[in-house]
Image (cartoon, coloured by chain):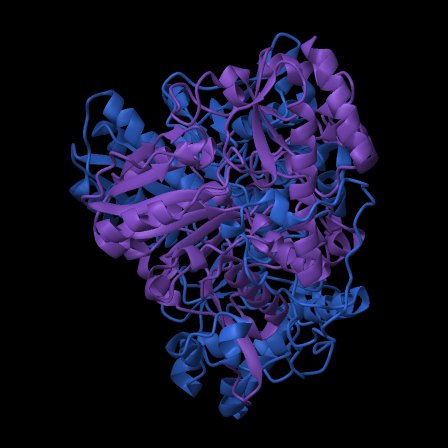
């Protein structure tokens, strides 16, 4: 395979390496950018409208910049930022695939974006239809009965799912105490369990990187509310004994929760519902390419099996006659969002699903798995896989050989990849793998880009032998070099005002 | 049908051979047959983008409440403010839109610095020293504030004014089922919180909204005194636009400020994505939920930004984390910082002032009509509640026929038994932003007169 720079941000640094001043540093008293409508509303003094006790003596200072300065400032900031549009972003567990511009256009449509969330259902039928259509499709994809679209991100979905679990058990007069989580799980899982009012019991992985079924049976009991599983798991491996796991958990009256972080691997191939899961959350910003926005907005809908539908958050958009209406399930756990969820993200996801259709989504999963396995094999000599067999959409590799031979660690490899014009993979996760580098190439990267990534890693391995010190100092061609994280934590400067003190 | 896969059939064949399987299905050979989906997904076939665009246009056309059809006087926590092309263009830059959480600071200085500027602005608006990088929305920010109060005091009793948005209170109740918090909703009397008879014993947090969801400017001092007496945290849920001219939460003695950041650079968006504003006193910083960006240096001594105090977070502390928040609303935070930069000091003040001027003008005109009375005698800022002769839902439907979204019928907002207002079916909540012209307001008044006759 020939390497091509298509997915590589080879021109970094784009804007030199000087710090960009803050908005506050470019502020000049008297400058203005804003322009408002001419309203001709009587301009009564504020003091006549609001009791003096409530008015600030000195109104808050923001900044004073021209529109041109603002544009230059923010554009320069954007040039100090890696993104999927710029190059390959193989960040394991994050599914940083290409985000179709069409979906951006959907979210920008004023006929969707200008609608007030409290407008009556009769005046928002288009939006309710979007929500119903999306819920139905997500249920078809996951094999579940109904869903809430309110949770704003995956972690919000997890907590919602745990509250559903709690409501279900309590409705049966069945107080339970523990939720089981594999040792390979994302950190959000145990954090959500605590907020759901449960205790975490960790179940170890076996030497194949999968849930140890015997160990699981050992920790199951009548006080277990359920288990949270990611399948494929965070190592990128399919939990092959899922039927046994499901049977064992259901046997003690527990529920199975599916963490949808890795749903991209199995679209159209396996459905969580068919694996025995009772509750499923999805990360629309991963699987359905609604972009991640530098850390949100996401969307984390939760779909459930029939026995849990009555507990779903409300209100939910439902079909009613020829139109759509809001309805709250009979034993709803209540609201989990101020309004209806991240609606524009939901509209993007629906558009993505509509464009792809059943076959397109299945091909998405297949190509994601193909790319990950190709990369796993291609890199086997330098970064062997933690578990050397067929993976799903991501592969967990290890830098232990480089560390043992040259003292070059996974972090060094990751930082050197930034110099090479690629985003780094996820490092040191899952926690159970030493020197882990988790690559998720996604389906939208071409084989030429994968080859370019592999050749970059080969160059890094060669440097490890000849110049390990240089790798410890990488990256050098990025807008800043390695940053002093300890200093940031020791002496917190979280605002420009604190910085000046 | 469209897809975005680059592979040619020849490349797929070559890659499969390299991997050692003979078909795409073969990649899943180790997946138990019993759980595999036979026959494919039960979904419609895919379509091209232009064809899908036509479907989406149909959804839009079915939204009678879109801005092209109705002039918006609805608020209740979601406001129709100007979002200029420059803000949309900058916040819409794909470098921000298509980045992940800034885990690799060397190539994420753009997002990190934008968040740092956002944190600075939220801290200034709240009058508190520290703000985080955003939460999902105002409602979930309130939940995090309650969790912080529990962490700070070890107590679980939360006194929440019924002047806090009804949906926020509903969300707080939902999550209390997991945390075991007791959420006590303190009633309103004529639009103001009636703190009399409230026992401060064992209270973790006292929460007041400023202005409250009915638009009323309450005196936060009483709630502050109650929090002090109880030894709990004082939480102010504020309107960030009003904060442009009102005394800050910090100046009222707040330990925590939470707010809904939608008014800064985010369209109405049918309720999301919005962003939760969260700021707190220095003493609570180690209990902050979610991401915080801090300033530091790189190895060459240059200023750099990085997510910090990471030991609080879920991926490090797992079940002992201060919050489970991971993904938040960064893009909305970037938009808020850009919008505030565009408004500047003078612009924010002018927007806040114009909101108040428009609201008072409309209030004065509407309350001259027969069948319209103020729902409360208390002073308000940019939003107000009216008691109408006819059911508010009917009035909203009627005015929609005249091109006006008249406000929010309160019985659609509050749950049964809510202690913020009596007979909510008679009450209409009306908001005015800087975008409403005198002509639009006058048209509203004429339409209301007609609707009440």
Residue B275: x and y, percent? 55, 48
Task: Tell me what residue is drawn at x 27 percent, y 29 percent.
Answer: A250
| Residue placed most toward the observer, B412 or A384 | B412
Residue A313: x and y, percent? 43, 27
Left or right? Give the position of A162 relative to A450.
Answer: left
Vertical relation: A74 (above or below) A314: below
Left or right? Give the position of A50 relative to A127.
Answer: left
Vertical relation: B401 (above or below) B272: above
**Would residue B156 be visible to someone looking at this image?**
yes
All told, the count of numbered labels is 0
The chain coloured blue is A
Quarter of the N terminus of chain A within the rendering: bottom right
Left or right? Give the position of A351 relative to B187.
Answer: right
| Residue placed most toward the observer, A153 or A356 | A153
| Residue placed most toward the observer, A43 or B99 | A43
Vertical relation: B30 (above or below) A11: above
**Would residue A247 be visible to someone looking at this image?**
no
Color used for chain B?
purple
Residue B71: x and y, percent? 75, 30
| Residue placed most toward the observer, B337 or A83 | B337
Task: Tell me what residue is drawn at x 37 percent, y 66 percent.
Answer: B282
Residue A338: x and y, percent? 50, 36
């Amino acid at each position: 395979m020939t390497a091509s720079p298509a997915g590589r941000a080879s021109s970094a640094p784009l804007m030199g390496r000087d710090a960009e001043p803050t908005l506050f540093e470019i502020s000049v008293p008297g400058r203005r950018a804003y322009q408002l409508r001419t309203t001709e509303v009587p301009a009564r003094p504020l003091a006549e409208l609001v009791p003096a006790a409530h008015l600030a003596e000195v109104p808050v200072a923001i900044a004073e910049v021209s529109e041109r300065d603002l544009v230059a400032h923010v554009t320069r900031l954007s040039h100090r930022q890696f993104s999927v549009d710029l190059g390959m972003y193989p960040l394991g567990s994050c599914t940083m695939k290409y985000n179709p511009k069409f979906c951006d256009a959907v979210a920008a449509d004023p006929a969707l974006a200008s609608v007030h969330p409290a407008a009556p259902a009769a005046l928002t039928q288009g939006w309710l239809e979007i929500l119903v259509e999306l819920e139905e499709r997500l249920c078809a994809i996951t094999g579940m009965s109904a869903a809430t679209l309110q949770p704003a991100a995956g972690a919000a979905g997890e907590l919602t799912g745990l509250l559903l679990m709690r409501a279900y058990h309590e409705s049966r007069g069945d107080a339970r105490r523990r939720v089981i989580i594999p040792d390979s799980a994302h950190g959000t899982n145990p954090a959500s369990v605590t907020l759901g009012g449960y205790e975490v019991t960790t179940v170890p992985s076996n030497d194949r990187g999968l849930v140890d079924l015997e160990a699981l049976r050992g920790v199951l009991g009548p006080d277990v509310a359920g288990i949270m599983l990611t399948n494929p798991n965070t190592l990128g491996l399919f939990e092959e004994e899922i039927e046994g796991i499901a049977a064992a958990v259901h046997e003690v009256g527990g529920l199975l929760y599916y963490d949808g972080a890795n749903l991209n691997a199995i679209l159209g191939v396996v459905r969580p519902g068919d694996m025995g899961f009772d509750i499923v959350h999805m990360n629309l910003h991963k699987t359905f390419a609604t972009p991640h926005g530098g850390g949100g907005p996401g969307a984390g809908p939760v779909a459930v099996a029939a026995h849990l539908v009555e507990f779903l958050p409300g209100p939910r958009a439902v079909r009613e006659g020829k139109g759509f209406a809001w309805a709250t399930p009979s034993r709803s756990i209540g609201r989990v969002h101020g309004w209806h969820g991240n609606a524009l993200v939901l509209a993007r996801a629906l558009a993505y699903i509509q464009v792809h259709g059943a076959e397109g989504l299945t091909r998405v999963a297949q190509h994601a798995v193909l790319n990950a396995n190709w990369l796993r094999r291609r890199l086997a000599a330098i970064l062997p896989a933690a578990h050397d067999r067929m993976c799903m959409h991501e592969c967990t590799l290890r830098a232990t050989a480089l560390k043992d031979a040259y003292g070059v660690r996974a972090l060094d490899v990751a930082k050197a990849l930034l110099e090479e014009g690629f985003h780094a993979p996820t490092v040191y996760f899952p926690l159970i793998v030493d020197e882990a580098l988790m690559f998720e190439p996604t389906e939208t990267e071409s084989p030429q880009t994968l080859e370019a990534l592999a050749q970059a890693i080969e160059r890094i391995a060669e440097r490890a032998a000849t110049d390990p010190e240089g790798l410890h100092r990488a990256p050098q061609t990025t807008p800043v070099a390695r940053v002093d994280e300890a200093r940031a934590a020791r002496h917190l400067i979280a605002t420009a005002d604190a910085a000046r003190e | 049908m469209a897809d975005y896969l680059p592979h040619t059939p020849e490349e797929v064949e070559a890659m499969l051979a390299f991997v050692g399987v003979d078909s795409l299905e073969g990649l899943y050979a180790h997946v138990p047959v019993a759980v595999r989906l036979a026959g494919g997904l039960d979904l419609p076939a895919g379509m091209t983008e232009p064809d899908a665009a036509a479907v989406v246009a149909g959804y839009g056309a079915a939204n009678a409440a879109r801005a092209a059809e109705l002039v918006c006087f609805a608020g209740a926590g979601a406001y129709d403010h100007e979002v200029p092309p420059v803000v949309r263009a900058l916040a819409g830059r794909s470098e921000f839109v298509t980045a992940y959480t800034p885990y690799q600071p060397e190539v994420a200085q753009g997002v990190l610095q934008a968040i740092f500027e956002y944190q600075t602005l939220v801290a200034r608006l709240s009058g508190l020293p520290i703000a985080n990088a955003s939460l999902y929305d105002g409602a979930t920010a309130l939940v995090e504030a309650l969790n912080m109060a529990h962490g700070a005091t070890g107590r679980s009793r939360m006194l929440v004014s019924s002047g806090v948005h009804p949906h926020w209170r509903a969300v707080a109740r939902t999550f209390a089922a997991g945390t075991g918090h007791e959420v006590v909703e303190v009633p309103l009397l004529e639009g103001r919180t009636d703190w009399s008879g409230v026992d401060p014993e064992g209270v973790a947090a006292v929460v007041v909204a400023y202005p409250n969801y009915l638009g009323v400017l309450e005196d936060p001092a009483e709630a502050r005194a109650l929090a002090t007496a109880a030894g709990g945290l004082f939480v102010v849920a504020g309107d960030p636009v009003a904060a442009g001219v009102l005394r800050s939460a910090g100046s009222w003695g707040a330990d925590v400020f939470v707010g809904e950041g939608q008014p800064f650079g985010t369209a109405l968006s049918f309720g999301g994505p919005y962003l939760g504003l969260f700021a707190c006193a220095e003493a609570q910083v180690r209990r902050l939920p979610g991401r915080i960006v801090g300033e530091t240096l790189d190895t060459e001594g240059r200023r750099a930004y990085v997510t910090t105090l990471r030991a609080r977070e879920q991926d490090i502390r797992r079940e002992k984390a201060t919050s489970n928040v991971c993904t938040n609303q960064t893009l909305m935070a970037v938009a808020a910082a850009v919008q505030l930069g565009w408004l500047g000091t003078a612009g924010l003040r002018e927007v806040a002032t114009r909101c108040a001027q428009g609201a008072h003008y409309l209030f004065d005109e509407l309350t001259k009509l027969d069948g319209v009375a103020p729902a409360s005698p208390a002073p308000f800022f940019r939003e107000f509640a009216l008691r109408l002769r006819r059911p508010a839902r009917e009035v909203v439907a009627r005015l929609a026929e005249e091109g006006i979204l008249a406000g929010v019928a309160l019985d659609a907002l509050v749950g049964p038994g809510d202690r913020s207002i009596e007979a909510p079916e008679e009450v209409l909540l009306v908001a005015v932003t800087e975008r409403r012209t005198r002509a639009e307001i006058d048209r509203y008044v004429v339409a209301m007169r007609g609707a009440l006759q």
